Image (tube, grey):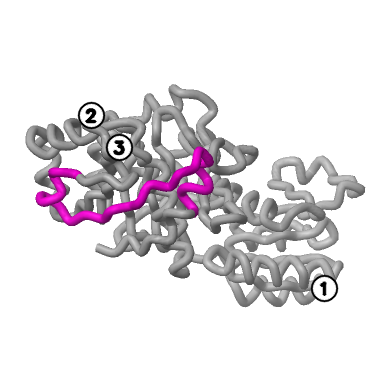
Amino acid sequence: MKIKLVIATCDSDYAEHLSNVLSEKFADEFSISVCSLDDELSEILGKVKFDAALIELQFTKPEKLSMVRLPIILYDESDNVPDEYECFVKIRKYQKISSIAGEVLQAYAETTASASGPGINKANVTACWSPSGGVGKTTVALAYAARRVLDGKQVVYLNLENFSSIPIFFSNTGKSISTAFEKLDSNINMFLMGIRQKDSGSGISYFCGPDNYDDIHILTADDVEKIIEACAFGTDELVIDLSCYCGECTKKALELADSVMLVCDHTRISQAKLKQFINQHNIFKSIQAKSILINNKGAEVEEASALKSIKLSHVPSTDPVFVYKTLSGNRFEW
């Protein structure tokens, strides 16, 4: 679903630049129209029902604002916004266009009911999990995500670890994913699209880490289902990085995934835990058909005969970003 957005500003050069960037970089999120005259705006609004409008103060007549589902005041810092517009969403004009897009998406999410429904998710969902810590699970998840970007796919990485490793791999200066957890009963799809960041080096989209440990820890399985379905909206591939503990939230994520990467390395501990999971845990039978064993760090895993498998070589580096980008050279075909 695209948001029908009209941009109404007298500054034609700014309108053209804003429209071009939104159309190029946010083509999946917005369908853009532009006008620079008051009469032109009236004519456009009479023909098309817009979801949102970025509209300068000189265009803000009451009859025009009422014709748009979400009118947003587009203001310059030098503008004196009258008190009568205090109740409207306001977005500053001259800032990063990616920030403007994010603010529009978040505001639109606030005004609409939940849009989740059958057939709305187009993403392939891949969960990355291991019963043992320290095997390189996050590195594998990011290597796979980066590989899919190289294959020309739009990829979102969702970290649901109890203790997030996001700051190690990406900038963590945007809005926390915690801000979305309070909106699980609203149009969370659009909100998450608005707060997700994009790493310029790898092309992976991601969410900044939670504000604190409890924000992830207290999520229920139903919460996780809503988050996964929402994150899968508007992208080609969703890669979920899970904590090692196989609680109800992890089980729900494994259940919803289209494919599961089970990660193991050369250590006896990780292989023993994997063997226990395969032989003793009832969830394994339900995911076996969609699971692939990732033999990480050059491992030779005895349980490989029970699963399709891929072997990843050991990358001799202590830089985790270098490691995952190096491993992204693998095709990950199964």
Amino acid tagged 3: Asp
Q: In the current view of this chain or complex, which residue is farthest to the front?
A: 316
Q: Nearer the viewer, residue 43 or 108?
A: 108
Residue at left offset 8%, top offset 33%: 280
Q: Which residues are magenta?
A: 301-325
For label 1, count other residues whose C-alpha is less than 10 Å away and answer few (under 14), some (14-19) or many (20+): some
Q: Residue at x 59, y 70 (%)?
A: 31
Q: Residues within 10 Å of mark 3 (few under 14, many from 20)?
A: few
Residue 39: image quadrant is bottom right
Query: Is 309 included in the stretch rendered in magenta?
Result: yes
In front of the other: label 2 or label 1? 2
- On the rendered image, what quadrant is the C terminus found in? bottom left
Where residue 94 sits, quadrant-wise, is bottom right
Do the residues under discs 2 and 1 have CB atoms within 8 angstroms? Answer: no
Give the percent coordinates (x, y) of residue 190.
51, 52
Residue situated in front as seen by the camera: 192 or 261: 261
Q: Is residue 244 magenta?
A: no
Residue corresponding to mark 1: 37
Q: For marks 3 and 1, give the CA distance.
A: 48 Å
| 156 or 225: nearer the viewer | 156
Left or right: residue 166 compared with residue 107: left
In the picture, the disc for residue 222 is 3
Query: Is disc 1 placed on a helix, strand or loop?
Result: loop
Q: Is residue 172 visible?
A: yes
Question: What is the three-letter code of the residue carrying label 2?
Answer: Ile
What is the spatial separation of the Cα atoms under label 2 and label 1, in whole angstroms? 69 Å
Among numbered discs 3 and 1, the one appearing first in the sequence: 1
Estimate the x, y position of residue 318 in percent, counting from the top left. Answer: 50, 38
The residue wearing badge 2 is: 269
**Residue 111 appears in the figure:** no
